[in-house]
Amino acid sequence: MYRSNISLILFILAYLLFIIFPKRRSLIAINAAGLLLLTKTLSLPEAIGAVNWNVMGIFVGTLAIADVFMKSRVPAVIAEIIVDKAQNTAWAILLICAFTGFISAFVENVATVLIIAPIALTLARKINLNPIKMMIAIAISSNLQGAATLIGDPPSMLLAGFTKMNFGDFFFYRGRPSIFFAVELGALVSFFVLMFIFRQDKHKVKVMPVERIHSWVPTVLLVLLIILLAVSSFFDTGFTCAAGIICMAIGIISLLWEKLTNKGKVIELVKSLDWDTALFLVGIFILVGSLSLTGWINSIAQSLSSLIGGNILLGYTVFVFISVIISAFVDNVPFLAAMLPVAIQMAARLNVNPSLFLFGLLIGVSLGGNITPIGASANIVSCGLLRKEGYEVRFKDFMKIGVPFTFAAVIASYLFVWFIWGK
């Protein structure tokens, strides 16, 4: 009883502190994990075992590749070409959002926004356009497509690590269309929402090219990474360590290439990676592991089962839309990590394919962050970039775009997953 009470108290306290002090989330998570060890709620081997090191390897390795890929300026040049070929401002913005989504399926969301933002802001300055709506659209497009593949965003990595899904499983899983197609359907429907939002921006855009490709090598490395991850799924069917090793290896090669060609210091390049989020993930793995080891996950599943009864559709709907609402205001990583084992137990109690709840949960946490400017890291970064340009984003400004976009994408994805996996 002592261990279970301590684990629950520390988890709730950490969660509250995440909300109050979002910029200190990694420090909070690591300290909470340390307290679990000091109070002997978890042993050191239990804490180490709770961390999914394969997911950590994927995350850190992908960050390194994304950083070098961004510096190559290939994405920026492609974005300029898209803008130049567009019929008018509205289509330029829509095509930039589509390109953002494409990159975000393979590169972490924040890195994607940082890749695209300079082009969007340059376009806005050239045609004297308020960039707020465009930057919001870029952020939410990035968040949506990040759920499409295993390497798109930490929630996808967490799901893969928990369920042992490989890269190919995000496209077809056990003979059925998987999460990729649910996300793409949501993207298609939400694209029409963006068309409506930008319908009045009809003047022609002409952008003078200012970007220059520094090298194609990072692009080749990124494509190689995707191929190797797909191939690894055939021999590492348990998602044990191959994906993490591949991402780390390509990440190290990317950093060494950056050092040799641009004379950058490897230590400085390594320091510039998002270690804050990496430490946060480690702490979250340990916190959620303590809940599972002390029996709280099973208790939560029992409570939800009692509330829902035997109604599978009700249970699925509750999972998806509670995830959307909560993720609109708090970080989706700890919530997803806590709810993954609950989803498995709920599916077992209702005698339904667990993929129904797992995929619904991923959709909810990934898209819910699009409702508010604090719901996802990409949103916070976009608002910060706008603030540097002298534009302040209010909650209502963000939600005017985020709410209809999220509603359209969630409903479409929710229905797709239900019809494919609800039987």
Image (spheres, grey):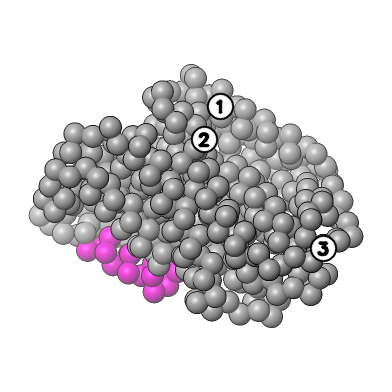
Q: Which residue is mark 1?
A: 230
Q: Main secondary structure of the magenta part?
A: helix
Q: Position of residue 343 (x, y in %)?
A: 27, 44
Q: Quadrant of the C terminus?
A: top left
Based on the picture, tell me whether residue 17 belongs to the magenta stretch: yes
Q: Quadrant of the N terminus?
A: bottom left
Q: On the rendered structure, is 209 left or right of 303?
A: right
Gap in Å between the C-alphas at discs 1 and 2? 13 Å
Where is residue 321, by image quadrant?
A: bottom left
Q: Is residue 240 above or below residue 183?
A: above
Which of labels 2 and 3 is toward the front? Answer: 3
Disc 2 target residue: 244
**Mark positioned earlier in the residue sequence (2 or 3):** 3
Residue type of the residue flagged with mark 1: Ala
Mark nearer the N terminus (1 vs 2): 1
In three-dimensional space, the C-alpha distance between marks 2 and 3, rounded to whole angstroms, equals: 45 Å
- Residue 68 versus residue 301: which sits nearer the camera? 301
The 10 Å Cα crowd at callout 1, few under 14, some 14 to 19, many 20 or more, is some
Q: Residues within 10 Å of mark 3 (few under 14, many from 20)?
A: some
Question: Is the residue marked by circle 2 packed among few (<14), some (14-19), or many (20+) residues within 10 Å?
Answer: many
Identified by mark 2, the residue type is Gly
Work out whether residue 100 can be spotted: yes
Q: Position of residue 406 (x, y in %)?
A: 47, 59
Magenta span = 9-22
The CA distance from mark 3 to mark 1 is 41 Å
In the rendered image, which residue does mark 3 sit on?
A: 204
Rendered image quadrant of residue 261: top right
Marks 3 and 1: which is nearer the front? 3
Q: Is residue 43 left or right of residue 332?
A: left
